[in-house]
Image: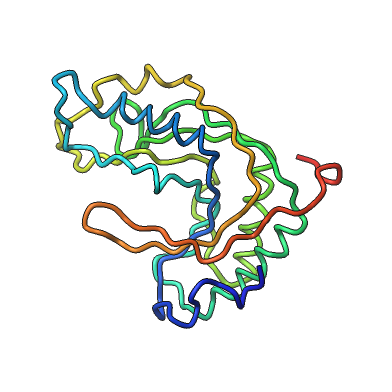
Amino acid sequence: MPARNIAGLASLPEHLRAFIALRLDAPVEEALARLIERLRVPENGSEQAGIRWVQRANFHLTVFFLGPSVPRDRLTPIADALGAIAKETSPFEIAARGVDAFPSLAHPRVIWVGLYGEALLGLAARVADAARRCGFAPERHTYSPHLTIGRVRSLRSPALPRRPLSDEADSSFGVSRVERVMLYRSEHGLRSPTYHELAGFPLEALAESFTA
């Protein structure tokens, strides 16, 4: 997709929150939705309010966060770079496995599922390099692929998942075949953010020419 075809580019805000991401296959997303239900609903059937669980429609793997206030005119160069990367990248697989939390399982603030695949790390490195060349600040931490499924609202929140997170530490949620990389914007909402795909770039290289 040429960068000039970014969805509604001319009508976008002058500054927007933007990131580069991947989506998982539907069966994997369904498995993650079932995981959230196991963790979310307590035995008495009333939902705990202390944790904000991510809605299935918002599941995504962030490859690179461009920033909370990206100038609209900077989207075109990064979209061009993503298009070039996609043409040189083959579709690949990533496995969703294990539940963990930041800063720890014992004191969770952000609850997440791990994502694994050497090709994923290679793609992330190429995207990070392209973003740097386009003038975006590098990430402060080493890239650690994960998909956030919940956020604890307060350090003082008494609410904890019914099922200990450690019970799911080694659970497997399936394998996804990644065939597109996407440029997204996000808007804050009253209950959760809304994500809008601005452009999608199919991975087009032949599998035989790609080394994970």
State the image coordinates of residue 168 (x, y, percent, origin top left): 40, 20
Q: Give the left or right position of residue 174, taking residue 156 as reference.
A: right
- State the residue at coordinates (55%, 46%): 143
- State the residue at coordinates (30%, 20%): 164
Residue at the extreme right = 208
Q: Give the left or right position of residue 155, taking residue 167 as reference.
A: left
Quadrant for residue 49, please give it.
Answer: top left
Quadrant for residue 138, please give it.
Answer: bottom right
State the image coordinates of residue 189 (x, y, percent, origin top left): 26, 59
Q: Quadrant of the N terminus?
A: bottom right
Looking at the image, residue 154 lies above or below residue 105 = below
- State the residue at coordinates (18%, 18%): 43
- State the residue at coordinates (42%, 27%): 99
Q: Quadrant of the C terminus?
A: top right
Q: How many marks?
A: 0
Q: Nearer the viewer, residue 72 or 133?
A: 72
State the image coordinates of residue 72 (x, y, percent, origin top left): 48, 78
Quadrant for residue 188, please give it.
Answer: bottom left
State the image coordinates of residue 8 (x, y, percent, origin top left): 48, 76
Q: Give the left or right position of residue 189, taking residue 123 as reference.
A: left
Looking at the image, residue 80 lies above or below residue 97 = below
- Give the colour scheme shown: rainbow
